Image (cartoon, rainbow, N blue to C red):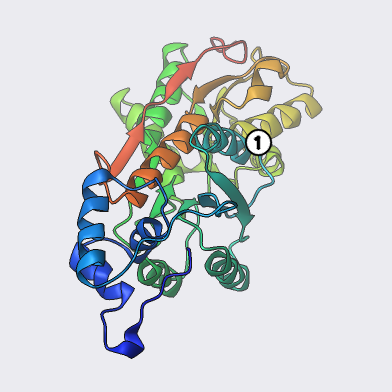
């Protein structure tokens, strides 16, 4: 944040103590001291009262003062899925006059520690963490630094009591499967996502719930795990096609895996949807132009990114979010890749 004189050596209270007495974070006190405007009026009044009582003088904001800054952190950035979240983040952050630093830690502890060093150096106001599992010690360091954190599409339960924003993955998985059941399919394959991810498990559970509701016993041989990338969809679909009795329809837990599956079908000389129906999950922009256009579950990725910014900005003003756990709705988008079985 800005340069703040704690004057602990003179026997006077430190800025950390000011923050403790005010019941706010150290960065919030720093923003008040440096004349930043992004502090709630009641919080500002409480901090300024303590600053006056302890002999601090508020510094006027100088020309060229650093703009507000957020860190947006992904495991990887090699997916259109990440681009959609960035689009939502940038739209709201830009309107709020907030800069965004985008990083990828690739699931490696060394990269995560390097990111944390950079975070401390640039004194970001908040962090949006997307499907990343940080080491608990790094979570603790964020807490000590007083940097607000919001988790988007959490891989599991966050190590800290941080707000989370996700999508209704269970109901999305159920809606995709129910759509295929409504067309008359009874042998429905699933290309699931990585089981370590909460969203993957929820989509699988939704698939199982729809089958159970229709009185169909789930066949484990029809469930193959992928990693959300097209290559894994291609490989998984090939495995399903090699079964003695292949499925007549396929639900892929990501659009990219669905596109990989469609390519595997094409190479076998099979047509979509005449020989096999395919449903994806995400509704990425390109799937409306696939051949055929893909039926999918729309996941509001840009909306998730936008809400994450609004939430973390509220936290920087020491305001609590309306709900610590938010799931945005998913919707079935029917296009030309699904039809009744031949």
Q: Is residue 316 or residue 229 the one in the foreground?
A: 316
Q: Is residue 127 or residue 246 the one in the foreground?
A: 127
269 with respect to 98 (left or right):
right
In percent of width and height, residue 206 lies at 37, 34
Label 1 environment density (alpha carbons within 10 Å; few <14, some 14–19, many ≥20)? some
In percent of width and height, residue 119 lies at 55, 64
Q: Is residue 245 or residue 63 the one in the foreground?
A: 63
Q: Is residue 51 or residue 268 the one in the foreground?
A: 51
Q: Residue at x 38, y 42 (%)?
A: 165
Q: Residue at x 65, y 16 (%)?
A: 288
278 with respect to 143 (left or right):
right
In percent of width and height, residue 243 lies at 62, 37
State the residue position of label 1: 80
- Among the 4 quarters of the image, the one containing residue 201: top left
Residue 243 in view: no
Q: Residue at x 41, y 28 (%)?
A: 172
- Among the 4 quarters of the image, the one containing residue 260: top right
Image: 104 above or below 308: below
- Figure label count: 1
49 with respect to 272 (left or right):
left
Image: 288 above or below 32: above
Image: 135 above or below 78: below
Residue 285 in view: yes
Indicate the secondary structure of the residue bearing disc 1: helix
- Among the 4 quarters of the image, the one containing residue 170: top left
In percent of width and height, residue 161 lies at 29, 58
> Which quadrant holds the C terminus?
top right
């Amino acid at each position: 944040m800005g340069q703040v004189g704690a004057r602990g050596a003179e026997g006077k209270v430190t800025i950390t103590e000011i923050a403790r007495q005010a019941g706010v974070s150290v960065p919030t006190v720093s923003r008040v001291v440096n004349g930043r405007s992004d502090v709630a009026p009641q919080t500002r009044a409480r901090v300024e009262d303590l600053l006056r009582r302890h002999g601090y003088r508020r510094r006027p904001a100088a020309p060229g003062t650093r703009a507000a800054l957020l860190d947006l952190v992904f495991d990887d950035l090699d997916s259109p899925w990440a681009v959609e979240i960035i689009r939502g983040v940038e739209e709201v952050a830009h309107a709020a006059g907030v800069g965004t630093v985008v990083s990828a830690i690739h699931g490696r502890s060394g990269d995560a520690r390097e990111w944390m060093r950079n975070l401390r150096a640039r004194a970001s106001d908040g962090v949006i963490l997307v499907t990343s599992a940080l080491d608990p010690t790094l979570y603790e360091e964020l807490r000590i630094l007083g940097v607000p954190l919001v988790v988007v599409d959490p891989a599991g339960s966050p190590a800290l009591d941080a707000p989370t924003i996700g999508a209704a993955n269970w109901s999305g998985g159920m809606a995709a499967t129910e759509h295929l059941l409504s067309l008359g399919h009874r042998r429905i394959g699933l290309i699931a996502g990585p089981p370590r991810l909460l969203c993957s498990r929820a989509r699988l559970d939704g698939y199982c719930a729809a089958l159970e509701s229709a009185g169909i016993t789930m066949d484990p041989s029809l469930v193959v795990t992928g990693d959300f990338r097209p290559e894994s969809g291609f490989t998984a679909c090939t495995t399903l096609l090699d079964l003695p009795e292949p499925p007549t329809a396929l639900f892929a837990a990501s659009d990219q895996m669905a596109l990989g599956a469609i390519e595997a079908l094409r190479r076998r000389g099979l047509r979509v949807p005449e020989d096999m129906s395919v449903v994806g999950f995400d509704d990425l922009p390109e799937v409306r132009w696939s051949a055929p256009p893909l039926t999918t579950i729309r996941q509001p990725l840009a909306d998730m990114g936008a809400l994450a910014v609004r939430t973390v900005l509220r936290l920087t003003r020491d305001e609590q979010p309306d709900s610590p756990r938010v799931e945005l709705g998913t919707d079935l988008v029917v296009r030309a890749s699904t039809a009744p079985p031949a």
